[in-house]
Image: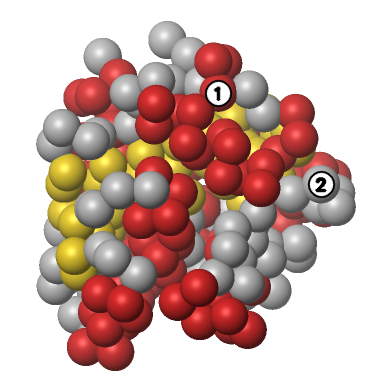
Amino acid sequence: MKPVGVLLCAKDFADKTEFQETYLVLLALKKYGIKTQCITLGDAQHDVIKGLFLSCENEEVHCVTESSFSAISEIISLKESVPESLSALILPGGFGAIQRLTTLETHGNDYTIDKELLTLAQEIYKQHKPLGFISQAGVLAPKLVDADVRVTLGTDVDRAELLDGIGAEHVSCPADDIVINLEMKIVSTPGKLSEKSDGEAAAGIDKLVRCVMEWIK
């Protein structure tokens, strides 16, 4: 089975939310025996990213040893990514997904998306491979696939209006659940956006990974 791509949007993971969601994705993929490939933006330093995973010390995300992290994922740049070499693509959220990959903050509903990501995601979609969106990364879904899509940004009304404004159907969803577009092979979960208690985001991300896993079997 080809690896599942996991996009790392932030340069230094200053946004703790994105780091935690990314880690939970990698952990779930490893649990189910799925090979992964982390995809970074061009200016991200691979040794810095590995160091962040190895030195993680907080109550919600536990450390991994260097050997186990090496087993979790290889790291390549977005420029190096090839759609044909991936079985699926998962995009964790956090503000990095919005700030570094779109012009949403300055152009609103008329925002554009990083061209390299747009090309990668659209090719994966055209090849009928799964796409997974977590947390704020869900904002990217309708423009990445250029189609009407059901997606969740949790239970926040303002976020629902944002998706409505760009042609997507927002589905209110708790952090421990997912929203599925079966024929399109697109799945999303709120991640940390709607988490009300510890473990909910992890449960939702685990469901998302299992859904992707079923599609790529």
Label 1: which residue? 83
Residue 16, compared with residue 42, is above or below; it is: below
- Amino acid type, residue under disc 1 in the picture: Pro
SS of the residue under disc 2: loop
Left or right, 155 with respect to 132, comes to left
- Determine the residue located farthest toward the bottom in the rendered image: 158
Badge number at residue 42: 2
Badge number at residue 99: none
The spot of residue 73 in percent (x, y) is: 61, 31
Observer able to see residue 115: yes
Query: What residue do we see at 81% from left, 52% from top?
Result: 44
Residue 102, compared with residue 188, is above or below; it is: below
Query: What residue do we see at 59% from left, 37% from top?
Result: 119
Left or right, 132 with respect to 181, comes to right
Q: Mark 2 or mark 1: which comes first in sequence?
A: 2
Q: How many marks?
A: 2
